[in-house]
């Protein structure tokens, strides 16, 4: 997940007859409201830059009118930019000739909209195969590929039904299957689940996350719902007034909201559910001892505990946890190495709570490679729960 799939640089879109006047006002610090009041030009997107990495779900979030739908239409060039660049796999979408753009949309890019946009007279299978039909794939092959994706989204038994015979949630699965059938490297999903009731919506999020675990596509997902963004997003970009005000992982946005606009999205939401061990840990709460041998010297333990600490973690040369040492029943430093269970930095809060509550000692937090990065104890967990759940407890 290293190379960027999509690169957006200084992207602007002004709707109106004199976009240059609007962009120079914006450059001078005017807001989109001031531009509209003085010139009648509508600012859709202003000076937006970000990268979407290969294989991530990148969520664009904002209130209605924040510019998120205009932004994705600039990315697939359904709308022409006023200024700036959009690179997909290194190609500038704004400058490719029409035939190449059409081929890019057919082979590399799929869109899933809020309105399912299914053809009512066609069967589920025929709807799912439609993108392949447009791309000129033969009937037998396109139906085989469409059937494979219908199986993935749990709709194979309904292949011969018409859309009207399906529930809204199932219709949206057909829309998702149609987008997946062309095997795109980039999927753009515009408020794809927002027309569904909360249960169906969660079900579709689960379908998407399951598919993503297997297939690792790059997905640009537009949403106005913070809970949805936190649940499915690898990273989230929050938009306001045509600008991006913050980009970060769910944890970064929860723990460090950029401003009051971002903070307002959290009203009434129990954000603690999206926290991980990495958000709870302290880096210097437990003393550390380095030991490469099985023999641990009592005087070294005493020096490490330094008269006031009760525990110390013992690390090897690679900073991996070997265990912990503590005081004996008389309060003296014991050289005995005790086994300790490690918690991965990415472990969700609920798992952390269960394990910390069951442990009398602090627990070490480790990176994916096993190296030590911090510790969690009951007090950390309680503080974070109190701060994030507040009135929700």
Image: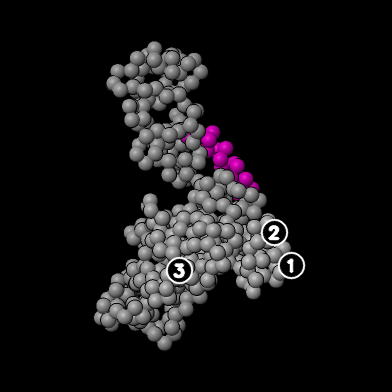
At 47% from the left edge and 40% from the top edge, which residue is drawn?
Answer: 278
Observer-nearest of 368 and 239 = 239
Residue 203 appears in the figure: no
At 44% from the left edge and 85% from the top edge, which residue is drawn?
Answer: 120
Q: Residues within 10 Å of mark 3 (few under 14, many from 20)?
A: few
Residue 364 sits in quarter: top left
SS majority, magenta: helix
Work out whether mark 1 precedes mark 2 in sequence or the reverse, and give the earlier one. 2
Whole-percent x and y of residue 243?
60, 58
- Is 292 situated above or below 25? above
Residue 140 appears in the figure: yes
Please name which of the two marks, 2 or 3, marks the residue nearer to the observer: 3
Whole-percent x and y of residue 49?
52, 56
Q: Distance of mark 1 from mark 2, alpha carbons?
A: 10 Å
Work out which residue is located at the far top of the displayed protein and give it: 299
Q: Is residue 315 left or right of residue 236?
A: left
- Disc ID at residue 95: 3
Helix, strand or loop status at disc 1: helix
What's drawn in magenta, residue-wise? 376-392
Mark 1 highlights which residue? 38
Work out whether mark 1 precedes mark 3 in sequence or the reverse, and give the earlier one. 1
Helix, strand or loop status at disc 3: loop
- Is 48 situated above or below 128? above
- Image marks 1 and 2: residues in contact by CB distance under 8 Å: yes
At 38% from the left edge and 57% from the top edge, which residue is drawn?
Answer: 55
Whole-percent x and y of residue 334?
38, 16
Observer-nearest of 243 and 23 = 23
Q: Distance of mark 1 from mark 3, alpha carbons?
A: 31 Å
- Disc ID at residue 30: 2
């Amino acid at each position: 997940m290293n190379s960027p799939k999509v690169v957006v640089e200084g992207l602007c879109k002004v709707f109106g007859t004199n976009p240059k006047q609007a962009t120079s006002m914006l450059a001078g610090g005017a807001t989109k409201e001031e531009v509209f009041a003085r010139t009648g030009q509508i600012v859709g997107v202003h000076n937006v830059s970000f990268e979407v990495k290969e294989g991530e779900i990148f969520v664009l979030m904002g209130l209605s009118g924040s510019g998120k739908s205009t932004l994705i239409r600039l990315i697939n060039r359904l709308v022409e930019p006023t200024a700036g660049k959009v690179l997909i796999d290194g190609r500038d979408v704004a400058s490719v000739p029409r035939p190449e753009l059409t081929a890019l949309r057919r082979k590399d890019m799929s869109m899933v909209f809020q309105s399912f946009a299914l053809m009512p007279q066609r069967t589920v299978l025929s709807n799912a195969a439609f993108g392949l039909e447009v791309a000129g794939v033969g009937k037998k092959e396109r139906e085989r590929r469409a059937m494979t994706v219908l199986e993935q989204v749990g709709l194979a038994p309904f292949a011969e039904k018409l859309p009207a015979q399906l529930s809204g949630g199932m219709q949206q699965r057909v829309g998702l299957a149609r987008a997946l059938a062309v095997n795109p490297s980039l999927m753009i999903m515009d408020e794809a689940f927002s027309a569904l009731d909360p249960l169906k919506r969660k079900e579709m999020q689960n379908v998407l996350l399951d598919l993503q675990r297997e297939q690792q596509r790059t997905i640009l997902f537009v949403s106005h719902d913070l809970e949805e963004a936190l649940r499915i997003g690898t990273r989230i970009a929050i938009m306001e007034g045509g600008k991006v005000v913050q980009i970060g992982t769910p944890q970064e946005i929860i723990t460090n909201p950029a401003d009051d606009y971002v903070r307002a999205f959290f009203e009434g939401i129990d954000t603690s559910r999206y926290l991980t061990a990495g958000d709870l840990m302290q880096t210097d709460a437990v003393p550390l001892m380095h030991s490469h041998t099985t023999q641990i010297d009592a005087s070294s333990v005493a020096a490490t505990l330094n008269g006031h600490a009760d525990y110390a973690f013992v690390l090897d040369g690679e900073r991996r946890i070997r265990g912990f040492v503590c005081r004996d029943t008389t309060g003296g430093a014991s050289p005995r190495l005790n086994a300790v269970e490690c918690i991965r930095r990415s472990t969700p809060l609920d798992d952390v709570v269960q394990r910390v509550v069951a442990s009398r000692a602090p627990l070490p937090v480790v990176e994916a490679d096993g190296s030590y990065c911090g510790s969690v104890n009951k007090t950390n967990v309680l503080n974070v729960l109190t701060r994030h759940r507040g009135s929700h407890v």
